[in-house]
Amino acid sequence: MKIHEYQGKQLFREAEIPVPRGIVVKSPGEASAAVKELGGKIAVVKSQIHAGGRGKGTFKEVPEQHGVVLVRSPEEAEENAARMLGNTLVTIQTGDEGKQVNTLFVEEGLDIARELYLGIVIDRETLCPVLIMSSEGGMEIEVVAEEAPEKILREHFDADLGLMPYQARNIAFALGMEGKTIRAAEKFLVSICKFFVDNDCSMAEINPLIVTGEGDLVALDAKVTFDDNAMFRHKKLEEFRDLTEEEPAEVEAQAAGLSYVKLEGNIGCLVNGAGLAMSTMDLIKLHGGEPANFLDVGGGASVEAVTEAFRIILADDNVKAVLVNIFGGIMKCDVIVEALLTAYDKVGIHVPLVVRLEGTNVKIARKMLEESGKDIITASDLTDAAQKVVATLK
């Protein structure tokens, strides 16, 4: 689950992680009032969407307007807010369609002496969190990794013990910090790593993390993502979810207990089992096709789940064919076919449908398909299924 920058900073503040003063606004007038409340001088007006690259991003309706702007008066804040709110911001991470900006975050300006990069993720090779820092703050970390990998520092830490103070000092020294800043870094880095673990984050990124003229560290940004599988432990975080920022079909699928991710292809996939779904997508691509989605109906797929899965897949106008790939393990193949045929009638399949079945009661299930009288293409194995579904598009 992703959250907005202002929400991340609210959580940082509660965890005693330094952030600038800021005010959430939803109208040009509120932006003007916010600058006045923050001192009436230098402030930053930031678009709030679930995407990075906002500072360089531009609006479709107002190409000269960027997603993050520095303003020097309440009037300037109001003018910029009027061009931002309700319009579509396009960044390197949104794609050409962009995202509509409905909320802004107005922050006080700070005395910036230095900009750093900070990120925390799970290292799946070492099976523990890793703190990643770089002296190249404000830049995309992918660019730094490619052009100057020696400037990226990594410090793994134990999830139970957290980042130890000596580890924080080591990375501070490596970044060339001195005096008061080293002490500030020790406290900041230990706190942000604790925040990451305590909240079951899958990623926490601050870009830039600034060193002020007085030597303090302040999170000038907050990009936080939580592990969906751990949200049952964090009921408070549910209020931060912004459904308008998520793919509607993915929200519907989650409510129905389906694992669904929309992709860019034109072959819909309905599969039971995450590993089998990944293999299905791979074979479709191997034989020249492009999957339109990842969809796992689970091991015990019901009539309702299969029906909803078909409805979600076919609601995507890009889908021109569907491949159903079922392994009858926990759920028997004949039960799956019964659900499939019921869903076929309820939803109304208007594109070629290829079905591959394997597992318990597969012979009975195949006979049911043959005798159904429905326009369904059967496949003997997964390779055959992938070839047939790709062929229907040619």
Image: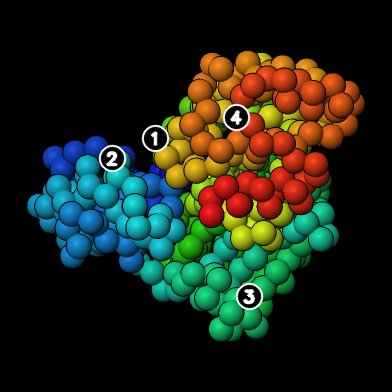
Q: Residues within 10 Å of mark 1 (few under 14, many from 20)?
A: few
Q: Earlier in the sequence, mark 1 or mark 2?
A: 2
Lower position in the chain sequence, tag 3 or tag 2: 2
11 vs 149: above or below: above
In the drawing, does residue 76 fall left or right of residue 305?
A: left
Residue ID for mark 4: 375
**Residue 193 position within the rendered picture, expressed as x and y whole percent measured from the top left:** 67, 52
Q: CA distance from mark 1 to mark 3?
A: 35 Å
Alpha carbon distance from label 3 to label 2: 35 Å
In primary-sequence order, the first of circles 3 and 4 is 3
Q: Which SS class for mark 2?
A: loop
Residue 348 location (% of width, % of height): 51, 23
Task: Check if mark 4's residue and mark 2's residue have beta carbons within 8 Å.
Answer: no
Mark 3 highlights which residue? Answer: 152
Of badges 1 and 2, nearer the viewer stands 1
Q: Earlier in the sequence, mark 4 or mark 2?
A: 2
3 or 4: mark nearer the eye: 4
Q: Is residue 62 visible in this depiction of the protein?
A: yes
Q: Which residue is mark 1?
A: 244
Task: From the image, state whether disc 3 or disc 2 is nearer to you.
Answer: 2
Residue occupied by mark 2: 102
Q: Residue at x 49, y 69 (%)?
A: 140
- Taking the spot 24% from the left edge, 37% from the top edge, the residue there is 26
User: Does dot 3 land on a helix, a strand or a loop?
Assistant: strand
Q: Give how far apart the Cα atoms at labels 1 and 4 are.
A: 37 Å
Confirm or deny contact between disc 1 and disc 4 (CB under 8 A).
Answer: no
* Amino acid carrying mark 4 in the image: Asp
Q: Secondary structure at mark 1?
A: helix
